[in-house]
Image: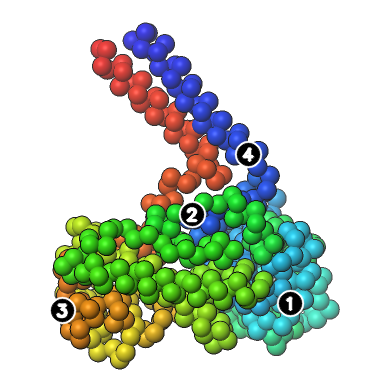
Amino acid sequence: AKRTRRAAAPLSMAALLIGLCCFSSSSSHHAPVVDAADPKTFLGTNNHKFWSLRGGSLVDTATKINFDDNLGSLSLYGVGVRKKGPIKVYSVGMYSDESAKSSIASLPKNKSALTTLRKSLKSSKTTSFLLKMNFKVGAEKMADAIAESVDPRTSDKGAVESLKKLIMDGVSAKGAATPGTILQFDCLSDGSVKVSVDGKAVGSASGLSEPFCDVFLDDNGVSPAFRESVVENCCGVASSSSSATSTATHSSSSHNPIHIIGSLFYHKLKLPKLPYKYNALQPIISEKTLRAHHLKHNAKYIETVNQIVSEGGVSLKHLSMEQIVKSKTLKESNPVLYNNAAQCWNHLFFFRCMSGSGGGGEPKGLLAKTIRRDFGSFDNLRKEMESSSIKAFGSGWTWLAYDKKEKKLVVSTMTGAGNPLIEGIIPILVIDMWEHAYYLDYQDNRKEYINGFFDRLVNWKYAQQNLKHAMGKGIVPETVHHVSHHGLPLVAALFSANLAKKTAVHMLFQQS
């Protein structure tokens, strides 16, 4: 046993040193690096005050509270913790339209950009602040704290009292602002601030829209971490293309498109490799069909997007794929870009909804349980998707998606380049109902094509990963091998040391 311990000690120490070296080398980088292929990207200085999940979602590392990348049609700008001494009271996230974000996209990453942003927000229809509680605060104290922050920024004391009463009434209805409570403040273009608590509207206070924004954005903002987050997340995006491109590596075949869609457009889109060979889906989908689908149709959408973005200047180059697909404004103002970008997203997603081996049949686990809950049975879901696909007029996509507001799965067939993300609904599975996906093999027999998809091709494992992501029940697997390289190398060190310890114990028992 003594000999084993002596042998194990250098092994454990070596593993720990390797991990700590990783930590040391990572900490030496002072400039943030955005990896366009990495599903988890750290933002900010080497202190890592917050980090981003691919697609724009941000997590406040001080509280571990997550903020979705969109609030309806509004985009997330930044997140940060509000402290009272050592107490982390709540995390705040700000949402507004894309036009205000564009106004600072090309500005350098410093806090002076916030002055420009504050001016731009005045013309925004809605700017929303979500305050997600991390510490229990009584209704009166919560109302007082926010009112005291707004008060010195306005001369309208009556409006401040109205705001205070609204907060108190809304929080009192549930007793206190307990951890998990969400206070929403919508700063509207008419100058009013609409107050909601846990999604329930309480009322509006007039004339406080600009002062309320200043509580978080001016030089004396109550959350320095939030201000830093906004700057890092929104500034220097267009100008950082050369350094980011030279640093990032891209392997589009290895990542979940739910996360790839956040890649910035300075990283030029390339035709992604399929996760299987062209003949792997036979006899359901022939090699001839799949080659034409991927190399001709999908490639054309990507070529068109790259051309439009390259000619569109800064206003387009700072956008992510997801921001385009979710933007109702862009769909109306630039339908050619929107439709081609959505088709790029849809095809990448669709190709991963099929498996070259072991596909089809019925789902298992969480997905099967959720399908039974929302549709009664898998057969009912299959019939609904089949019926929706067959009845659809023209070309489109039949989606199984998760509605986070209703907390249930839904089926919808959307024409053209339709994608449920534009409605804030998260895709789980899709069937491509454009003729180029099936016509060479089935002509107008859509039913046979759909049956083949369910019987032999559907990738339920992938669909379940998407459901877990949508429901917030876990980290997508592709994240795991990136964690130790972007701000959590100490985890790798601890893992290495723990592995060495287990190995030593194993050796001990072997010698015994």
Q: Amino acid at mark 1?
A: Ser
* Label 3 environment density (alpha carbons within 10 Å; few <14, some 14–19, many ≥20): some
Coloring basis for residues: rainbow
* Label 2 environment density (alpha carbons within 10 Å; few <14, some 14–19, many ≥20): some
Name the residue tied to disc 4.
27
Point 42% across, 47% down: residue:
480
Q: Regarding mark 4 in the picture, which secondary structure is present there?
A: helix
Name the residue tied to disc 2.
250
The reply to whether residue 298 is visible in this rendering is yes
Disc number lying in front (4 or 3): 3
Instruction: Pick the residue in front: 434 or 165.
Output: 434
Q: Are marks 3 and 2 in contact (CB under 8 Å)?
A: no
Name the residue tied to disc 3.
448
Q: How far across and how far down the image is residue 107, in percent?
A: 74, 65
Cα separation between marks 2 and 4: 23 Å
Q: Regarding mark 1 in the picture, which secondary structure is present there?
A: helix
